[in-house]
Structure formats: C-alpha cells, structure tokens
Amino acid sequence: MRFELPDGSAREVAVRYALNAGYAGRDTAEVRHHVDELAALGVPAPNRVPTLYPLSASLVSRPGTVQVAHGQTSGEAEWALIVTPDDYLLTVACDHTDRALEVHGVAWSKQSAPDVLGDVAWRLAEIDDELDRFTLRAWVRHGEREELIQDGTLAQLLPPAYWIKELGTRLVPGTVLLSGTIPMLGGVDQFGDGWRVEMTDPRGVSSRISYRVEELAPAWD
C-alpha cells in the first residue's frame, strides 16, 4: 500500500500480517462498562483486556466500496500502526465489522470485513510526543445525510508504544496493527450506506478514509 507523508514524500509497504486490538481504551472502568454493555447484547466477553485478534493480511485494503452480506455492519474509527523495515508509520483506519456475526464470536466478525487504511501516514518517531492531541472522528452516511458518530482523540486509546512494548519481535516488517476504537455517540444509527473517517494532527494535517457500503443480493438457498 502507498502512503503520502506530510513532507510530500511517499512510502510503499507490502502488508504481510494484520492484528486488530480490542477493548483498548486507557480508561479501564469505561472499557469494563463497554464489555458489560456488549455482553448484554449477546457479544461474548474477551478472556483478557485489552485483547488482540490476528487477521488475514488480505483484509487490509483501501476500497471505495465495502460489499456486505446484510444491513447489520458498521465501521469503527481507529489508528493503524504500520511496521516497516526501518521505522513505524501511523495512519487512520476503519475496522468494518459484521455486528450480526459479532454475537457468535468477535474474532469471526473481524474476519468478515476489511480493515480500511487512510491515505496519509506520519512517521511515528516525529509525532510520538503529540499523539494525544490528534483528533479522531467518524461520520456515517444515510443517503444524502451524514451524521457524526465518533468524536474523540488518541488520548482515549492505548498508545502505539504500549503495543510495541507488549508485542516486541512479533511486530515484523509488513505488520499492520489497528488500535481498537473510541465510543460511538448515542442516538446515531450506525448502520448506514457509507462511512468517512478522519485523523488530524495538531497542525491540521489529516489522514482520510471514505467508502460506500453495498449490500449484496441474498443467497439462493
């Protein structure tokens, strides 16, 4: 995948492995509340918090359209750490997830839809001391109407440094690690026909994602 850097240069990375973090907020009480909320909806609680789901590298992409089997899927605004042979890059990500399948197993739901990455990436070493001031926002689209559904900062999530320390040599070049997400705003229908996500640094530089959601025809069974 090709990423533009804020200085005008570009980097290309061959994705070999994908990891999705979950329940990875810094506020442990808020994370536990989220686990309990999901359990009430039938979503199995994780064995440990935070948790990590290995995915097929083929799911990491930048599609204009995400095709889904039914209308109960939605995105999640996240950051993505990209491991290169000589450094780390950070970009915005959207973990599109099958909510109906999630009740049968979060790991299964993660495998059913893509991890969408942004267009701009930062060198982690150049922004590490200001990450908490990066904003992370997502909008869900219903026809011509777009609604803000997530609005926060990277200070709400465990930082890349946590995962770099925890995973050590597992983070080989070509690995993409998604951070887990921030809470959704109440009263907004997450099941739409499009998603847009932005992560913006303190200087106003943004990494962006935008895609349509297309529901496929039902199976002939």
Image (cartoon, rainbow, N blue to C red):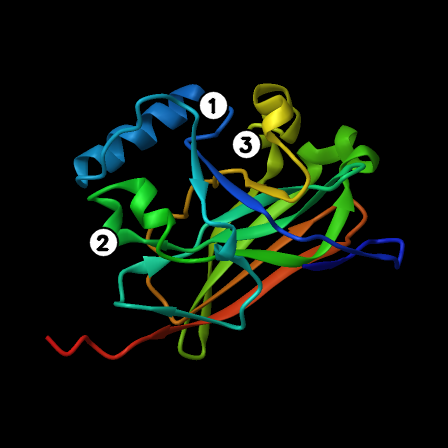
Q: Distance between the Cα atoms at labels 2 and 1?
A: 27 Å
The C terminus sits in image quarter: bottom left
Q: Is residue 172 above or below residue 109?
A: above
Q: Distance between the Cα atoms at labels 3 and 2?
A: 25 Å
Callout 3 secondary element: loop
Instruction: Look at discs 2 and 1 and give the one toward the viewer.
Output: 2
The N terminus sits in image quarter: bottom right
Three-letter residue code for mark 3 = Leu
Provide residue 56's location: percent of width, then percent of height.
46, 49
Callout 2 secondary element: helix
Q: Which residue is mark 2?
A: 100
Q: Which mark is residue 112?
A: none
Three-letter residue code for mark 2 = Ala
Provide residue 151's location: percent of width, then percent of height.
53, 47
Q: Quarter of the image holding residue 38? A: top left
Judging depth in this view, the residue of 94 and 155 nearest the camera is 94
Q: Which residue is mark 1?
A: 27
Mark 2 in CB contact with mark 1 (< 8 angstroms): no
